[in-house]
Amino acid sequence: MTDPAFRADVLAGLRADPPAIPARWFYDRRGSELFERITDLPEYYPTRVETALLAEYGPAIAEAAGRGRAVIEFGSGSSAKTPHLLRAVAPAAYVPIDISGDFLRDSAAALGRDFPGLAVLPLEADFTRPLALPAEVADLPRLGFFPGSTIGNLDAAAAVDLLRAMAGTLGDGAMLLIGMDRVKSPAILIPAYDDAAGVTAAFNLNLLHRINRELEADVPVDAFAHEARWNDAAARIEMHLVARRDVAFTVAGQDFRIAEGGGIHTENSHKYGARDARLLLRAGGWTPVTEWTDAADQFALILAEARPRPIAP
């Protein structure tokens, strides 16, 4: 069954000038599998650095956040980093949220086997939209977990909206542990999003395969090439699918054309200075409590608390 939101976003995105499709649609089962391969690539430092931070600072995170909370993970994927956090904070329950249902259920089952005494409550949902948490965690204090600098996929306004929505979902007094990637040299950033093995290229191009499969489309996938760019003014990596030649195709009965050299903007990954990150969190309704970074300051884990907004000023 075709997801009507996917259809609407693709058609609206292809009609936009320039064309752009939201990055959340990367994550069908194949896309999720490819992304997990990306996280193991030597060029892709974020997962490696963030996992090391969780392993090293788990006890400090537990001391600051408190044990026995329900851990709510937004965009859980394979939950590969999650065991480090769960071992440290000894949660009362774990709710992984992901848009890719089959992948989510497989990951949740594997985690349940590793933590047999833990209530694992998978929730198939788009966490960028309003959602209701399982009834089992209604009365538990909550720790949101949003790793991978996924917040960087959104522009500032959308990121603030999402953080506010998370605060609303988790409630006053909840905590949020969020990963945020730092600004650094393009010599490090570009290879992380355009690896030598071509896995990120396959991940990007898989979006076109998904469109063809689910939206009765005939996009000539081989006419497009993956491209990663550093946009210094916006402090972000951009991923594009660039047309190698003039192309014409149909999606869901609608005709589209893209000229050679034109393309489809498929992802942003914003990078943050330390002050930028704290300002973004405060704008989203979260008060930073403490943070942990690696020795090279490539990546940060920030713990923040949802507090009621002050009346004045």
Image (spheres, helix red, strand yellow):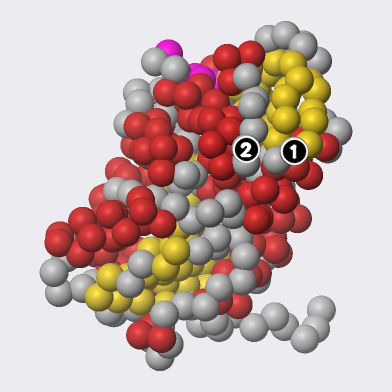
Against 179, residue 259 (above or below) is above
Which residue is most to the bottom?
A: 139
Please name the amino acid that badge 1 sits on: Gly
Name the mark on residue 253: 1
User: In the drawing, does residue 20 fall left or right of residue 106?
Assistant: right
Q: Nearer the viewer, residue 52 or 242?
A: 242
Horizontal relation, residue 17 to residue 236: left or right:
right
In the rendering, at what x and y percent does residue 223 appear?
Answer: 63, 14
The part of the image, by quadrant, that contains residue 237 is top right
* CA distance separating discs 2 and 1: 8 Å
Residue 209 shows up from this direction: yes
How many circles with numbers are drawn on the protein?
2
Residue shown at 54% from the left, 17% from the top: 187
Q: Residue at x 49, y 44 (%)?
A: 27
Q: Position of residue 100 (x, y in %)?
A: 44, 52
Q: Mark 2, residues whose alpha carbon is within 10 Å: few (<14), some, or many (≥20)?
A: some
Asked if the stretch drawn in magenta spans residue 193, the answer is: yes
Magenta residues, start to end? 189-196
Callouts 2 and 1 close, C-beta under 8 Å = yes
Q: Quadrant of the C terminus?
A: bottom right
Q: Position of residue 78 (x, y in %)?
A: 33, 49
Q: Nearer the viewer, residue 258 or 288?
A: 258
Q: Is residue 154 magenta?
A: no
Tell which residue pokes out farthest to the top in this image. Answer: 245
